[in-house]
Amino acid sequence: MNDDDAVEALMTATRVLVGVASHAMEGLGGQVSLPAFRLLLVLDELGPSPGGVVAARLGTAASSVTRLGDQLEASGHLARRRDPANRSVVVLEPTAAGTEVVRTVLRRRREALREVVGRVPPDERPTLIAALHALREAAGSDFGAGPVELTAL
């Protein structure tokens, strides 16, 4: 197998993972967009955080986080408050509804991935696991292999 074969296999795997991620978002009634979900996912990892920190983690402009925050606040998924130590800083925090969306989507992703992995012959699973660990190691933080799941999705 050469590098081009590996790239093609990864392109196929990417389509599978994007499909799993998209499928997990279905049934939310359109209440949370994918970019808004990513914001909630970052807050789930970091806890209540200033908008600038969230923007940096998402790799986007603070104004984008403000717009997403407006949408999430209006839908009841996000609360904003002033930082008592610095009143110019706005802290973002998911509401119970926002946390529930994150839990639901991540649970659906895990279920779908378990189903897919369950279709891999048991004797091939150790090879799959080793390959996925090697891929994550090779990607490092440069390609979203950090702690936030599927950051590019």
Image: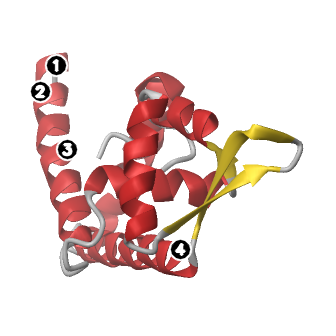
Q: Are marks 3 and 4 in contact (CB under 8 Å)?
A: no
Q: Residue at x 55, y 29 (%)?
A: 56
Structural distance between the alpha carbons of marks 2 and 1? 5 Å
Structural distance between the alpha carbons of marks 1 and 3? 18 Å
Q: Which residue is at the front of the view, 129 or 79? A: 79
Q: Which mark is residue 2?
A: 1
Q: Which residue is at the front of the view, 148 or 27? A: 27
In the rendered structure, which amino acid carries the disc numbered 1?
Answer: Asn
The residue indicated by pointer 3 is 14
Q: Quadrant of residue 110?
A: bottom left
- Name which of mark 2 and mark 4 comes first in the sequence: 2
The residue indicated by pointer 2 is 5
Q: Is residue 149 visible?
A: no
Structural distance between the alpha carbons of marks 3 and 2? 14 Å
Q: Which residue is at the front of the view, 26 or 146? A: 26
Q: Position of residue 34 (x, y in %)?
A: 28, 55
